[in-house]
Amino acid sequence: MTRYMPAAPVAVLSFAAILTLAAYALRSGFLPDDTVTLWASAVAAGGGQVPLGRIVAAYPTIPFLATTLLEFLLPDGTPAPALLAALLLSLIAARWLTAFRASGLGIVAALSATVLTAFHPALIRAAIAGPADMFLAVFLFMLARGLYDLRAQSAAPEVMTVALALLGLAFSHPMGAAVAIASLPFLVFAVRPALAAKSAFNLVIALIFPTVFCVGAFAYVSWVFPGSGWSFLTAPAASLAAWAAGLAHIWGQGVTGSLALDAGLTLALSLVLGAPAAAVVLAWVRLRRPLVAPALVLGAATVFAAMIAVTAGVFGEPVALLVVAPILAAIVILRIRDVRERFPVVIALLVVGWFGGMAGVVIVDPRIATHARDLVNGSLGDRERLDALNLGNATVGREGVLVDSFNAPAVVLGRGRARGLHAPQGEAFALTMLLARIDAPFVALPDPNSAAGAQDQLNKVFPKLYRSGIPGYRVVYQNATWRLFERLAPARVPND
């Protein structure tokens, strides 16, 4: 029992630390676009502002439903996605600490390994990015454990563990779906050779059947509910072009001439930098295939997933796959007992991997360097997102605000709730667009020359309103990007 006692304070401290970092990232405008969209959509769904069909057909399903449930249960304004992400990281930290202790490590060694893996820069980035990235980390670790168990025994429980891990990956994050697809050609190497020789095809079918079945069912549900289809509520942001441009700043015109190959090489380099302990330990036991094959399968599937994502263009950016580095480091410590004999060397490698993880994050996600430079210079992040947050805060206490919150989800976050907004999923917004007539108590419009204003649906229908104003309305709030108009009350006619 004593070996598990330190897990509680570690979980509490990690929860508080990540929650603080996430709150600062939100206020500073450093949250990823996908996180802001997921958060705003969950706030709207938790407040009853989203039709049931769109909730059922939302993607990524697991983080969206979990966040929506928290939004429904917690008071308005509670940062449910940040709470959920911090909770998941605290559970990972507690789980790894207890697992390290159970594997025979002393309390100091286990705490050191936990701090250097659970608080690896890649996992911290994932926790700040939100629940989708953290669910991805959880299921990747589940897959890593399942692959080692599968190689050792390949019985029904081990097969089901890997199958459920692949299913969780497919519905936790777009890049998780890419990993599930990329794993297919490598799964045969994760089972015992004797079993693979007899029924490799049947075993792979058993591993992927739950995922294939649930994907088919999900596609059917998305098709049945009106207005959903494959236009998922929280689809990944179309930011591959921006990510590729950032990668070009590092590699110039590229190393291989192919963006997909460059992405795979970049991620592989980041994994080696972030998890040198895994690389060295695997080199120590390179002749013992049951200890080497599962880790190599996970690493190969991850690199291949990055290449698939860049080639297909529908899974988002490969940045989320950075969490594989601390997972590989943790799993080799847990499953390869040779590390006990040379654990000081392993700790030193974990320290190197922590700093290498920082370099890997910068390499795979060049925007991190921009954010770090902004922090050093004392400036803030996305100016337009901060303006949207401030506009949302300005709408607190005002009901009937007509705004394109799909285009600017940060408005919902700044307000703290979706009730009181006439958003695109509502009838009032649809009638305004259909009739080209504004009758809402309040109207929020972004500058047409801004990035948000160029995509705003209200600006497209009423292109002159931002500058010319609206007859019968006055400006009650304004910042660098947004203007909030209020409808004037009709003049009272005195009774004779």
Image (cartoon, rainbow, N blue to C red):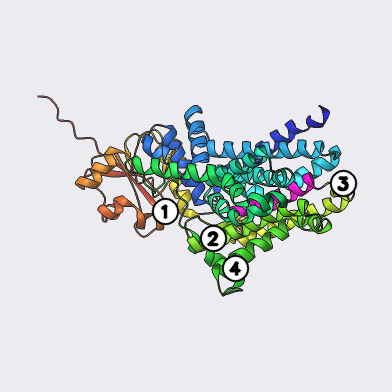
> Extreme top residue here?
496
Measure the alpha-carbon separation of dots 2 and 4. Answer: 12 Å
Residue for badge 1: 480
User: Which residue is at 77% across, 49% downward?
Assistant: 332
Give the left or right position of residue 2, taking residue 82 as reference: right
| Horizontal side, residue 162 vs residue 4: left or right | left
Q: Quick one: SS at disc 1? A: loop
- Residue 1, image quadrant: top right
- 496, 55: nearer the viewer: 55
What amino acid type should be assigned to the residue bearing mark 3? Arg
Q: Amino acid at mark 4?
A: Asp
Answer with the quarter of the image where residue 149 lies.
Answer: top right
Residue 91, placed above or below residue 59: above
Q: Amino acid at mark 1?
A: Ala
- Bounds of the magenta segment: 320-336
Is 493 within the magenta? no
Relative depth, front residue between 188 and 95: 188
Q: Residues within 10 Å of mark 4 (few under 14, many from 20)?
A: many
**Residue furthest right as drawn:** 341
Tag 2: residue type? Ile
